[in-house]
Image: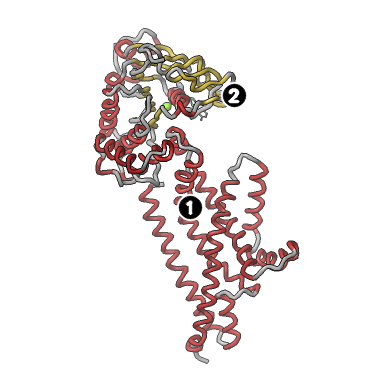
Amino acid sequence: MSLDFSVLLRFQEALALGLWTTVKLTLICIVLGCSLGFLVGLSRTSPSAIVRGIASIYVEFFRGTPVLIQLFWIFFCLPLVLGVELSNLASGVIALTLYMGAITSETFRASLKSVGREQMDACIALGLPRRVQVTNVILPQAVLRAAPTLLSNCISLFKESALVSAVGMADLMFVGQNISNNTARPVEVLTIVALIYFAIAFPLTRAVTLVEGRILKKLAI
Amino acid sequence: MTSASAPLVSIRSLHKSYGPHIQVLKGLDIEMKPGERVVVIGPSGGGKSTLLRVMMGLEKIDSGSITFGGKPYISSANADAKTAINTDVRRSIGMVFQHYTLFPHLSVIQNLVLAPCKVRGEKKASATQRAQALLERFGLGGKANAFPAQLSGGQKQRVAIARALMLDPKLMLFDEVTSALDPELVAEVEQVILQLAEQNLPMMIVTHDMWFAKNIASRVIFCAGGVVVEDGPPEQVLGSPREERTRDFIDRVFHIKQ
Ligand SMILES: Nc1ncnc2c1ncn2[C@@H]1O[C@H](COP(=O)(O)OP(=O)(O)O)[C@@H](O)[C@H]1O
Ligand SMILES: [Mg+2]
């Protein structure tokens, strides 16, 4: 039996739709997850032991358990706990946001630490109000320093998002599996699906190197 | 409080410790008149930086008080009490640090205009104009859009001075601002500070540079062990100190044999 990639031509549209779902899900969870991660990262430097404790339990739990189990838990248990039906998209967004929040919070924590006391001294000596210190000095430096690692976190999320297919969300992976079942051509289909993931992830991994080299060197931070 | 002899800064019985065991300032009294340029010298670890940091409002104090232009500025009744800092007064003081502390993610001009725009609500166009003029004056006209990492140490320090001046301070504090510089870059920074001295801007300067101390100071204070040991005109303190400890220090640090 020879390989025949032509079967896939019929499914261009389905694959495009699946890819769109994957990209949409990833982008939403990047925005929500990074915001959550920044807040949790900040909380882990809080003077309150309770705030620090809650934040670190959350982070350790989500970093220390398989994403697949987190997904199942949120798809099947959370509706029971909350007593409401959640759409596939909503559950996927919640699960991956919580996962992304946990991993990026570690990234932000390290970068927040590296914005040193001297920068704070300079802020005070210039009379900058607290709000300006955070938004104009601390946040931009923390984000810049975190940028390469955050980009890697985003690429991981993009690939990990394939797990939502396991709970029936029609993402790229799910569509790929469906086509492969219908055509009985798993090798061709999964190869193409892998290539699609790769075509998006690879330029991004190159971008990480670029960001690291260019921006950080220019700012020397 | 506008008479010529009224003090600009009056430090009374200033005590400061880091934790229970490190007593750094042990009852410091210093009075500074308007237009004075005070150079503070003393052994490393003697509390010179701490004094300047306290005056900038960066540190809590145990007890004592500081007034500025006759107004209460910093005070604390005892080590357990809160250090009260008048932030309005603090805005009239500027400080330059040993390690530049420019904002690395902002260009030179953005470093200069951030505080005037955010603190005083100055229009960006007007702040930018003032900043550009200041940069030209300091020989940095072409560096407005450079980032700090692209500058030499001497250039960075001149930018840091310009940044502080954007807020029209009534007193400038310089903490060993040339200590981190390569020797050939020291003069360009000291020239800028000497320029400011010509305009009678009051300043307090910590330095180990003998030539600079002599040329900039209208008064020299020798600080050691957390107290003022000797205080007088530069010819006296640097030239023929009265106190033995001052003499030892000057001999050692400045290699001047009496
Ligand atoms: N943040 C701090 N925490 C604890 N000890 C400090 C701190 N800053 C300074 N010190 C100590 O206080 C003393 C005075 O330091 P400093 O004011 O920097 O002296 P100088 O500038 O005269 O060299 C030193 O012994 C130093 O180790
Ligand atoms: Mg010092």
Establish if B34 lies above or below A196. above
Circle count: 2
Residue count near mark 2 (Cα–Cα under 10 Å), binned few <14, some 14–19, many ≥20? few
Establish if B245 lies above or below B189. above
Please name the residue shown 33% across and 43% down the image: B125
Occupied quadrant, residue B138: top left
Establish if A194 lies above or below B20. below
CA gap, disc 2 and disc 1: 37 Å
Q: Is residue A159 left or right of residue B229?
A: right
- Chain assignment, label 1: A
Can you tell which of label 2 and label 1 is closer to the viewer?
1
Establish if A3 lies above or below B54. below
Please name the residue shown 50% across and 85% down the image: A8
Please name the residue shown 26% across and 32% down the image: B188
Which residue is disc 2 drawn over?
B20
Locate residue A74, reporting x and y percent: 68, 64
Tag 2, which secondary structure? loop
Task: Tell which of A45 and B84 is nearer to you.
Answer: B84
Which residue is disc 1 drawn over?
A146
- Scheme of colours in the image: secondary structure
Tag 1, which secondary structure? helix
| Amino acid at pointer 1 | Ala
Occupied quadrant, residue B209: top left
- In the rendered image, the residue lying farthest to the bottom is A1
Q: Is residue A91 left or right of residue B42?
A: right
Task: Tell which of A25 and A180 is nearer to you.
Answer: A25
